[in-house]
Image (spheres, grey):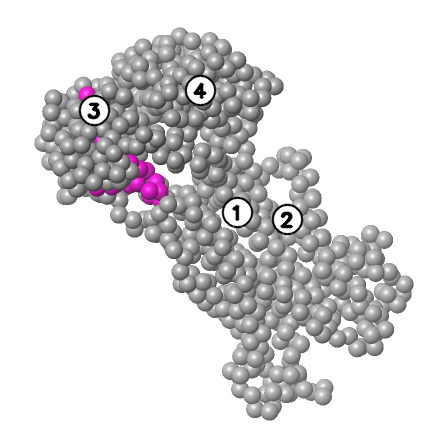
Amino acid sequence: MFRSYFKTAWRNIVNDKVYTTLNILGLAIGMAVALLIGLWVYSEQSYDRFLPGYEDLYQVKMNADNNGEITTYSSTSLALADALRMSIPEIKYVAETDWMGPHGLMAGNRKFYLNGGQVGADFLKMFRYPLLQGNAATVLQQPYSIVLTASTAAALFGNEDPLDKIVRVDNIYDLKVTGVLADLPANSTFQFKYLIPFSFFEQTTDWVKAARRGGWKENSFQVFAQLQEKASYEKVANKMKNIAKNNDPSVNTEIIMQPMKNWHLYSDYKNGKEAGGFIDYIRMFGIIGILVLLIACINFINLSTARSGKRAKEVGIRKALGSRKSHLVMQFLIESILITFFAFIISIVLVQLALPGFAVLTGRRLSIPFLSGTFWCLMIAYVLITGFIAGCRPAFYLSSFRPVKVLKGNLKTGKGGTIPRKVLIVLQFSCSVALIISTIIVYQQMQHAKNRPIGYNISRLMMTNDNEDLSHNYVALKDELLQSGIVESVTKASSPATNIYSHSKIDYWPGKRADETFGSMGTIAIATDYFKTLGMQLKQGRDFLGSVDADSLSVILNEAAVKRLRLKEPLDQSITWHDTVKLRITGVVKDALMESPFASVEPTMFVYNPAQSVGNTIMYRLTPDADPELVVEKLKQVFNKYSPGYPYNYRFVSEVYAGKFNLELFLGKLAGLFASLSILISCLGLVGLAAYVAEQRTKEIGVRKVLGASVLQLWMLLLKDFMILVAISCLIASPLAWFFLQNWLQKYAYRINIGVGAFLAAAFIAIFITTVTTSYQAVRTAVANPLKSLRSE
């Protein structure tokens, strides 16, 4: 019997090539979109899960109470790491880390400037990345040692065995290679080229020593912990919560843990708790994938039920010969699944062709796991479920025809056949219109942030990572750069122009209430000409004078800090920093966007400390007539003169700032792509339905034309029903899209107000596309010779 079902299904598919092609093509595009999104979602959710024991790994974070507003920081103190080791036996390992920036690595004549990490001795015991050489228990025990990734080892030593060889770091220290790690996969949160023991930096770096002395108030490091097997997360979390307050009552912070499985997807915190992050985009595009597939299934349903007249006699004869309704349902479902199978084959080809472009768009290299049995089991289920959804309505609708009426030629579909079809068209276009509205709103939000005043001039501004050599020769370097004629201003700071690396607790300020706290303020140590080089404007007071004696106890605040401290007359007021250090406010600078362009400007203070070198960034602005592409070689010569042990590295601030929009740009492009595909699928369905409607009304059109109706009138008559359905779709989609997009915009402190323009534009696009799609068939029918259609009357 099943053989007969498949034979009959194949004959019907072959005999109705036009509608079969429309069905297969629409389903193929919908299935390809859903499959592509599914591969991407799986890739994003697989982050870090390749590591053995990832379920027991956590990042320790800090919730700071800023006058009732809880802010979560990933940076904590070294004192916390020590306390966790000593006080909580349920914790197996603790590792303090620092990922502030790249360092220079040199072996022989090979020099590289690479990103790495300074990590505690237990780091590789916790994070069990595959070690190709060395022992995880010992590779980080000796301070003057280094662990390289395989690609870094090959770059430094070629085909030689790197173990026990010497790598010169920062052109000062010689470290022995104690281990080689396999290169990290793309779905690893940590991305580094080497690891250096944290004990090395504690011995050699003054600011790390100072941070150790700063205790619980110096929060500049990331701390990770691994729980003992079968240890209770809730029990450890309760013990950890008040560990900072118990050790230092002046610190008003709570300590929390975030499991490793949530790092990639749940990066946003609100009031001290996880509040989303990349998971929001995963859910959004998961819904989009389902909607696009649903639109394709609706196409199949509408085209199948619209062609019911063609299949009515077949149903009548089968029933007259004894076929049961269940047999007919099975016949039509098998036909639907067969069409879905062909669509799936095409969808696999489409996905394979789309993967390179998708990798460029998303930055993720995806692949179809052809050799995975699990994948093919899921795909079989995918085809069966999609085929059932697409064929369910046609199967039960067509099998319900009464043989007596059908064979007498009295079959009338009536409202029972047309109303469900119209409802499905409305549903289909509601999804498409909602996607169009979403694309427009995402684009408007991104443009709104791009047009936001930055507060400093990113044009012609360059950045280079500082190092020991450049720091020792900074004055000479600055002089030579200024004398070169290609640079008009030079400075350096503890954070780049596009970020704030450090935060500090403010203990006292004028007007502070007894119960008020200020958990953490952005802190940037700067040298002379900082505001001049960046183009930031002083609103009140003066710049630093360039003298340690005059400026070491001075501070300049931005407008956000003044507002947060409620200082009406900030100049010459004093604030207390690190319990005992009193800083006098000598200036107020206008707010500048140093972090997210979608967020509020962070309260920030600028202190004068030109001697600080570790983690510094040298910033310099090119002269107006300097060609950025031509001056790089000249700059390279100057920097290499004062830092021969490092390759010259540079970044244009404009490019780094533009990178802050990458996620939203990616979101907008994907939303636009999938909206376009949903419209394309809908149009394929409209082409088939328009042809069917025109065929059904051929005689009516002939009569109207004989009675004097013009081509324009007939065109409008055929389009009217479709226009009404699309208009209803716009009315349904608009409030739904507004609701979801309004919630999505709440995550941005700096956001647009949704206006009516996006909805009108989406409605116009939908109506225009519907008109273009259906007009060919409508005009073709309207201009046809009425004698042909009325010949039989």
Crowd band around label 4 with a 10 angstrom C-alpha radius: few (<14), some (14–19), many (20+): some
* Identity, as a three-letter code, of the amino acid under mark 4: Ile
Q: Nearer the viewer, residue 481 or 76?
A: 76
Q: Which residue is mark 4?
A: 243
Pick whichever of labels 4 and 3 is earlier in the sequence: 4
The circle on residue 285 is 1
Badge nearest the viewer, 2 or 3:
3
Is label 3 or label 1 in front? Answer: 3
Residue occupying image coordinates x 32% and y 30%: 514
Lower sequence index among marks 2 and 3 = 2
The picture places residue 362, in percent across and down from the top left corner, at: 45, 42
Q: Position of residue 176 (x, y in %)?
A: 37, 10
Distance Cα–Cα, label 4 vs label 3: 28 Å
Mark 3: secondary structure: strand
**Label 1: which secondary element:** helix
Pointer 2 residue: 345
Q: Amino acid at mark 2?
A: Ile
Instruction: Please give the name of the residue rendered at 58% of the width and 39% of the height, measured from the top-left corner.
Output: 368
Kindly identify which residue carries mark 3. 582
Q: Closer to the N terminus: mark 3 or mark 1?
A: 1
Residue sitting at x 44%, y 25%: 255
- Measured in 3D between alpha carbons, the distance from the residue under mark 4 to the one under mark 1, in whole angstroms, is 40 Å
Q: Quadrant of residue 620?
A: top left
- In this rendering, the answer to whether 231 lies above or below 756 is above
In the depicted structure, whether residue 771 falls above or below residue 671: below
